[in-house]
Structure formats: C-alpha cells, structure tokens
Image: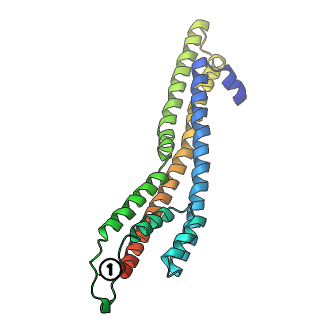
Amino acid sequence: MSLIRLIGEASLIVQIVLVILLFFSIFSWAVIIYKRNSFRAAAKHSLKFLSIFRRSRNLTEVNEATKQYRSSPLVPIFQAGFRELTSLPLKSNPQAGPSPKPNLENLQRALLRASNAEVAKLERMMSFLATTGSVTPFIGLFGTVLGIMDAFHKIGIVRSASLSTVAPGIAEALVATAAGLFAAIPAVIAYNHFLHQIKNMITEMEDFSLEFLNIAEKLYGP
C-alpha cells in the first residue's frame, strides 16, 4: 500500500493532524533557509568589516564603509559607538592644558544596547524552530493514538480481528507519528546548529565592543 493511499484512506482526524504537521514542516524549512542565508551573509560581511576596522586608522572612513556590510551584526554596534564618540572631546594637547575627563560609560551603554538589539535579531524565529522540534512529535503521536482508536472501533463493527483487517488501520495511524518525526528532526538539528552560530557571533560582538572601547580610550581618554 503506497503512502499516498494510506493518507487518502486515513481517518479525518489523522488527516487533520497531517495537515497541521505539514504546516509546521513547511514553515520550519522556510525559517531554516532564511536563517541559513542570513547567518551566511552576516559571517561574510563581518569578516570583511573587521578587516577594514582593524586596518584603518580613521574611524570616519570605517563609518563610510559600513554601508557595504549592513548584514554584519558588528555594523550597528560600530555605528552606535561612533555616534556616541562624536559627542566626546578629543584627548587634550599637553601644551594646551588638560581637558575634562570624558565619561566613557555612555559609550559602553551605547555599545551594550546595540549588542542586545543585534542578539534579539539573531534569535528571531528561533523559538518557532524550538517549538516545532518539541511539539510536532507529540502532535504526530496524538494522531496515531486517535487513528488506532478508530481502527479498533472499525474492528468492533466488522467483528473480525484478522491481520488484513487490523493492519491497514494501524498503518494509517502510524503515518502521523512518522510525519511528526519528519517535521521535528530537521527543526531540532537546525535549532542546535543556529544556536551554536549565535553563540559564536555573540562572542565576536563582545570582542568587537572591547576593541572599540580600547580605541576610544586611546583617542578620547584622559
């Protein structure tokens, strides 16, 4: 008996469960493809932006280059820090006398706010993958239980417990479990993979913020 025929002959409740699982599967794959492409672009742009940032001695030039690498989560952090730096007085000339000590705490807060905003963007739609991975096996199991109950109900009506009578109903019910696993497994794998990438990018953002603060202290410190 083919899979399509099994689905076609399944009970209405099993078919409804399969439609729900199909929805989860389609949208989880859409999220997986979107996140994969966005993370790939972010990694590529971050690598190029970091190269420019570490090579350049002029932050204004780096700020101009940010237009080319908007996919990088480091760019909004740099832009937030750069905007804050423009309001700070430059390090004083020893011959001109000391200038008031600038408060770099505002810069730290600006970098932290920008970092938190980027982390929120990176984690967007991750909850859907987690939900798909944890819920769909139980939805499939629910469909299987109801399908088996329906199969036994039909056995009671026919009053025959032969294999030819029982097997089709059980097979139709088990399709729901298989569909639940089919939806859950890719979502769980993708979730764990993306979570690892997000942790790496968070570490990269923290390191970049420290680098930016070091530059700010050299240029604008006491």
Q: Is residue 30 left or right of residue 95?
A: right
Residue 201 appearing in the image: yes
Residue found at x 61% / y 55%: 37
Residue 50 appearing in the image: no
Q: Which residue is mark 1?
A: 221
Q: Which quadrant of the view contains residue 140?
A: top right
Position of residue 97 relative to residue 27, above or below, is: below
Residue found at x 64% / y 16%: 165
Q: Which quadrant of the view contains residue 206?
A: bottom left
Q: Is residue 23 left or right of residue 195?
A: right
Residue 12, horizontal then vertical, whole percent: 60, 18
Residue 76, horizontal then vertical, whole percent: 48, 62
Q: Secondary structure at mark 1?
A: loop
Disc 1 marks a residue whose amino acid type is Gly
Residue 79, horizontal then vertical, whole percent: 47, 65
Position of residue 16 relative to residue 30, above or below, is: above
Q: Quadrant of the C terminus?
A: bottom left
Position of residue 154 relative to residue 183, above or below, is: above
Q: Is residue 110 left or right of residue 193?
A: left
Q: Nearer the viewer, residue 201 or 25?
A: 201
Q: Quadrant of the N terminus?
A: top right
Position of residue 210 relative to residue 115, above or below, is: below
Q: Which scheme is used to colour this image of the protein?
A: rainbow
Q: Nearer the viewer, residue 209 or 176?
A: 209
Q: How many marks?
A: 1
Residue 65, horizontal then vertical, whole percent: 57, 70
Q: Residues within 10 Å of mark 1 (few under 14, many from 20)?
A: some
Q: Nearer the viewer, residue 88 or 11?
A: 88
